[in-house]
Image: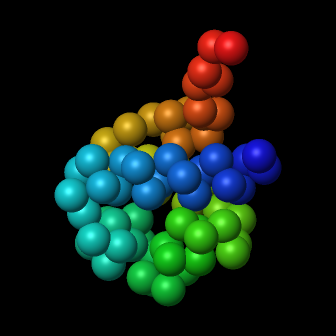
Amino acid sequence: MMLRDIFARNVRIWRARRKLSQEALADAAKVSRGYMSDLERSVNSASLDVVERVAKALQVSPEELLARPARRPG
Protein backbone atom coordinates (compact mmCIF):
# COMPACT_ATOMS: atom_id res chain seq x y z
CA MET A 1 0.00 0.00 0.00
CA MET A 2 1.42 3.37 -1.03
CA LEU A 3 1.70 6.19 1.52
CA ARG A 4 -0.84 8.21 -0.47
CA ASP A 5 -3.35 5.34 -0.05
CA ILE A 6 -2.62 5.10 3.68
CA PHE A 7 -3.18 8.83 4.10
CA ALA A 8 -6.46 8.64 2.15
CA ARG A 9 -7.73 5.73 4.25
CA ASN A 10 -6.80 7.38 7.53
CA VAL A 11 -8.36 10.72 6.57
CA ARG A 12 -11.64 8.95 5.72
CA ILE A 13 -11.57 7.05 9.03
CA TRP A 14 -10.82 10.13 11.15
CA ARG A 15 -13.30 12.30 9.28
CA ALA A 16 -16.04 9.74 9.97
CA ARG A 17 -15.02 9.54 13.65
CA ARG A 18 -15.21 13.32 13.92
CA LYS A 19 -18.55 13.32 12.07
CA LEU A 20 -17.32 15.90 9.58
CA SER A 21 -18.45 16.30 6.00
CA GLN A 22 -15.80 16.54 3.31
CA GLU A 23 -16.79 20.18 2.89
CA ALA A 24 -16.37 20.96 6.60
CA LEU A 25 -12.98 19.25 6.70
CA ALA A 26 -11.89 20.99 3.51
CA ASP A 27 -12.89 24.38 4.93
CA ALA A 28 -11.04 23.71 8.19
CA ALA A 29 -7.93 22.56 6.29
CA LYS A 30 -8.15 25.48 3.84
CA VAL A 31 -8.45 23.35 0.70
CA SER A 32 -11.30 22.95 -1.78
CA ARG A 33 -13.88 20.23 -1.30
CA GLY A 34 -12.89 18.78 -4.68
CA TYR A 35 -9.25 18.54 -3.62
CA MET A 36 -10.26 16.89 -0.33
CA SER A 37 -12.30 14.38 -2.32
CA ASP A 38 -9.27 13.69 -4.53
CA LEU A 39 -7.08 13.18 -1.45
CA GLU A 40 -9.57 10.74 0.08
CA ARG A 41 -9.69 8.76 -3.19
CA SER A 42 -5.88 8.78 -3.63
CA VAL A 43 -6.20 10.74 -6.86
CA ASN A 44 -3.76 13.41 -5.63
CA SER A 45 -0.90 13.38 -3.14
CA ALA A 46 -0.90 15.88 -0.31
CA SER A 47 2.01 18.19 0.40
CA LEU A 48 3.41 18.14 3.92
CA ASP A 49 1.71 21.49 4.56
CA VAL A 50 -1.65 20.00 3.62
CA VAL A 51 -0.99 16.90 5.75
CA GLU A 52 -0.38 19.21 8.72
CA ARG A 53 -3.51 21.29 8.07
CA VAL A 54 -5.72 18.21 7.66
CA ALA A 55 -4.28 16.69 10.84
CA LYS A 56 -4.94 19.91 12.76
CA ALA A 57 -8.50 20.06 11.42
CA LEU A 58 -9.06 16.44 12.53
CA GLN A 59 -7.32 17.05 15.89
CA VAL A 60 -4.81 14.25 15.33
CA SER A 61 -1.08 14.19 14.72
CA PRO A 62 0.25 14.09 11.16
CA GLU A 63 1.87 10.78 12.10
CA GLU A 64 -1.55 9.25 12.77
CA LEU A 65 -2.65 10.14 9.25
CA LEU A 66 0.47 8.52 7.77
CA ALA A 67 0.53 5.40 9.97
CA ARG A 68 0.13 2.05 8.27
CA PRO A 69 -2.78 -0.08 9.52
CA ALA A 70 -1.82 -2.69 12.08
CA ARG A 71 -1.35 -6.15 10.62
CA ARG A 72 -3.52 -8.92 11.90
CA PRO A 73 -1.64 -11.86 13.38
CA GLY A 74 -1.59 -15.06 11.39
Q: Residue furthest right?
A: 2
Q: Pick out the residue farthest to the left.
A: 19
Percent x, y of residue 59: 31, 42
Q: Residue furthest front?
A: 74
Front in this rendered view, residue 42 or 34? 42
Residue located 30% across and 55% down the image: 16
For the C terminus, which image quadrant?
top right
Is residue 57 visible in the rendered image? The answer is no
Relative vertical location of residue 7 with respect to residue 26 in this rendering, above or below: above
- Closest to the observer: 19 or 54? 19
The location of residue 13, given as percent across then percent down, is: 41, 49
Residue 30 seen by the camera? yes
Question: Residue sitting at 54 percent across and 52 percent down?
Answer: 9
Q: Is residue 58 left or right of residue 49?
A: left
Left or right relative to 25: residue 52: right
> Where residue 25 appears, x then y in whole percent?
33, 66
Please name the residue shown 60% across and 51% down the image: 7
58 relative to 61 in the view: left or right? left
Is residue 23 depicted above or below 50 in this figure? below
Q: Residue at 64% of width from left, 33% of height from top?
A: 68
Counting from the top left corner in percent of width and height, residue 10 is at: 50, 47
Colour logic: rainbow
Left or right: residue 31 versus residue 2 is: left
Q: How many marks?
A: 0
User: Measured along the vertical axis of the image, is residue 64 above or below residue 53?
Assistant: above
Compared with residue 53, is residue 71 higher up or lower down, i.e. above or below? above
